[in-house]
Every structure is written in C-alpha cells, then in structure tokens.
Image (cartoon, rainbow, N blue to C red):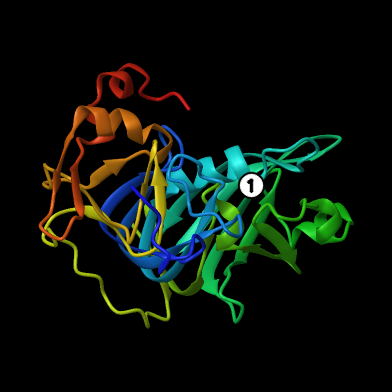
Amino acid sequence: MALAAAAPPDTPVQVQMRNVALHVDADTILSIRQLRGELISTHPGAPPVFDDKNSFVVRIDSAEIAITDAGLSQLLNRYVFAYDGSPLRHLDVTTEGRQLKVKGTIKKGVDVPFTIVADPRVDESGNLRLKPASIKALGLPAAGLMSFFGLEMDKLVKVKPGHGVKIDGNDFVLIPSGLLPPPKIEGRLQSIRVEQGTVVQIFGPGKAAPLQPPEPKTNYMYYRGGLLRFGKLTMTDTDMELIDPHPADPFDFFQERYNEQLVAGYSKNTPSHGLKVYMPDYHSLPRARATSGQK
C-alpha cells in the first residue's frame, strides 16, 4: 500500500478496545474492559510497527483496566523488581476487602519476610500509592520498616529509575507508565478500586470522541487513521478492526505472537477499503495450549 501525503508517518493512530484480555507475557494478562487512546511512534518520521512493541507507546485518553492479584504479583516479580541487587523478592499480592496485602522478602544480609497491608489510592500525580495500614517483619508488628531496620526507606528499598516504582516515606508509589514492559503506556490514573482478587484502574480524562468500528457489538481492537505497519504491509489512513469471532468470553490477544492468531483466522475488506480481521483467542491455538503456564 502506498503512503499518503496527507498522513505523515508520525501521525498518531487512533485506537479503541473493548473487552480484551491483553497478554503482557504468556500468562500475565491485563483485562481491558474498555480503552480509547492512540499509538504514538517512538521513532520520529516512522509509523508504529505492530510487530515491534518498542516502536510505539499507547497514550490512553480513557480506559478501565483490571489485573488480578496474581497478575500484579507477576508484574512486580518479573519486571519491576527483576534486576540484580533488587532488595525485594518473592512478592505475593492478594486482596483483602478494599486493601492490598503484599508479602515478600527483603534482602538485608539474609532474607527477612515481611507483610504489608496497604490502602491503595491515586495521588495528585496520577500514580498508584500504597499507604501501609500495618507492617510486619519476621512476623512481628513494626512501627514501620525504617524503624525496624534502622535505615531510611529509600536505602532499604532502593529501586532503579524507570522501573515503575518509587518510595515516598513509608508509601510505595507505583507509576503506571513504568510498570509494564513495551509497548509502554502513557495515561493519567484517575481512580482505583479493589474487587475480589482484582485491582481495577480507571484512566481519564476521556475527552476523545469514540471511534466507530465496522463491528461495534463484539470484542475488538480497532485502529483508525495515520499509518500503521504490520507484517510486510503499511496501511494508509489505517482502518483495521481485530475481531473476536467468539465473543462469549474476552478477546484473548498476545501481540508478540499475533501472527499465529492472524494465520489461524481470516480477513474481509470493507466497502470503505478498511480491513476486518477475525482472530481466534490466543489460548485456543495449539502452541498456546502446549506451552500453557510458561513465560
């Protein structure tokens, strides 16, 4: 497809999603109940490349995104604190009413088990702040980790920049834009609620007009406008809807392996030269079933 002069390569591609189980890796999943935003190229003068998750960021205008407590535990262990010298290990997050309980070990000469029960809230910067209601180390109540270890918190839990977490007093501050591996997200967190076994994040401000996908009543990912590369093609004035042909459950989509879903599905052109792509759920593919539980 030829590039259109009216659509520069760095023009954002508008995106809208409905009821998508989006894989971070093989078994860590974000439940995107709804999302409206755009793809922003990370390379000036070049369009987003669907096959290269580092080639764009997802800038969220509005969204409701849920993650299970097990999924949040995996994010913290596999990405946020997965670096040499990390002071926190073996983190396990569970929900308790409207609070989050975080268990793990602190590396300070020896591994010291700890438990924090925290109230999650959104701060003025749009970050998720976990404010401890109680702290235990070695199974004993402590006034705070700083007093227990005789250290400043930022020395006790020293994290590398860009890993999506920082320490403010006794609070853990999770920064949404840094928690996930590529493709990165940008967006302002407006509120949060804890459901049984699940943390739900609401992003705003919600100023973008809704898109009108060819099939709006199913589970889908819809891309509109700008240039978008996928496989060997570049779509001009992008108009592509990825559709769940069996919408009884969420659309299970794994971008790193989307070509396997693409090959197993089929596509149709629309009268306006758009593309409707019907994809089976990732977990229904033979390879996904064979590697279930592996990263």
**Residue plotted at (44% across, 68% down):** 60
Q: Position of residue 21 (x, y in %)?
A: 31, 47
Q: Vertically, is 19 above or below 34? A: above
State the residue in front, 147 or 73: 73
**Residue plotted at (15% across, 61% down):** 272
Report the label total. 1
Q: Is residue 289 left or right of residue 70?
A: left
Q: Is residue 238 left or right of residue 95?
A: left
Q: Is residue 155 left or right of residue 91?
A: right
Query: Which residue type does callout 1 highlight?
Result: Val
Local crowd at mark 1 within 10 Å, few (<14), some, or many (≥20)?
Answer: many
Q: Residue furthest right?
A: 150
Q: Quadrant of residue 84?
A: top right
**Residue plotted at (53% across, 68% down):** 119
Q: Is residue 98 visible?
A: no
Q: Is residue 108 visible?
A: yes
Residue under circle 1?
80
**Residue plotted at (40% across, 55% down):** 3
Q: Is residue 182 left or right of residue 85?
A: left
Local secondary structure at mark 1: helix
Q: Position of residue 183 (x, y in %)?
A: 51, 50
Q: Position of residue 71 (x, y in %)?
A: 44, 44
